[in-house]
Image (tube, rainbow, N blue to C red):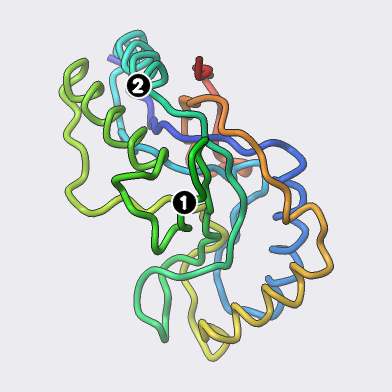
Amino acid sequence: MDNLRLFLGIALPQPIEQALGRVAQEMEPALSYRKWTHPADYHITLHYLGNTPKDKLPDIRLAAQEAAGHTQPSRLSLSAPGTFGSPSAPRVLWCGIEEANDDNTVAGSQEADPAVSPLHALHRVLGERLQERIGYEPEARPYHPHITLARSCEGERCDKSATQELWHTLAAREEGLHAVWPASSITIFRSHLGRSPSYERLDTIPFP
């Protein structure tokens, strides 16, 4: 049986991809990350499924449709970067996400209250539907919506404060980085190893 490396997430509008890509391109020579994400691969992960039998795709789509039907309208914007891993040798450099629903502004990636965050609610409901449909077990760790910019920093140029200072300098010059856009759909992605861009969009499930 054919297996596909799959995950579900929120794709970015092309102008946001391009603006973020321009800033990342200017950050790259100043930082010591070994691998930078291709702008076409920028996304906000909801759930990573990994190697999955191809014949489960219809059930995955049904789970995504059910979750999309419970999704509140949400507007997204980019926020300051952060890192995962050791401060001296971060594993991941990410761009934060700020969100707002119809009632109020919701805090960004590091401070979002899961009780009011539309992305956290979508993550929870989608995980439940995937569990019911294909037996997927959601990760136990807290959900942290973000966009991965780079991986594996080694050397002297990994400092978080310097990274954020560089970001703010470049962001001030990149007007497109400050746009707000509506989250409009769930995308089913396929990951291809050894390719750049790496992610193929197999299906898009719009919100109501």
User: Where's residue 168, x and y in %?
Assistant: 69, 75
Q: How crowded is mark 2: few (under 14 residues within 10 Å), some or many (20 or more)?
A: many
| Front disc: 2 or 1 | 1
User: Where's residue 86, x and y in %?
Assistant: 35, 79
Q: Residue at x 31, y 27 (%)?
A: 126
The label shown at residue 4 is none
Compared with 83, 188 (above or below) is above
Question: Which quarter of the picture shows residue 32?
Answer: bottom right
Inspect the image, locate mark 2, and give the three-letter code of the amino acid beneath it. Answer: Ala
Q: Is mark 2 on a helix, strand or loop?
A: helix
User: Where's residue 194, x and y in %?
Assistant: 53, 44
Q: Residue at x 64, y 50 (%)?
A: 38
The label shown at residue 106 is 1
Q: Is residue 72 left or right of residue 33?
A: left
User: Where's residue 37, x and y in %?
Assistant: 59, 54
Q: Is residue 203 visible?
A: no
Q: Which residue, as the protein is rendered here, is positioned at the far front?
A: 103
Inspect the image, locate mark 1, and give the three-letter code of the amino acid beneath it. Answer: Val
Q: How many marks?
A: 2
Q: Disc 2 to disc 1, how far (Cα)?
A: 20 Å
Find out whether the residues at labels 2 and 1 contact each other: C-beta distance under 8 Å. no
Residue named by callout 2: 67
For marks 2 and 1, the one nearer the N-term is 2
Front residue of 79/101: it is 101
Q: What element carries label 1?
A: strand
Q: Is residue 161 left or right of residue 84?
A: right
Q: Residue at x 60, y 78 (%)?
A: 164
Q: Is residue 16 visible?
A: yes
Q: Residue at x 77, y 58 (%)?
A: 22
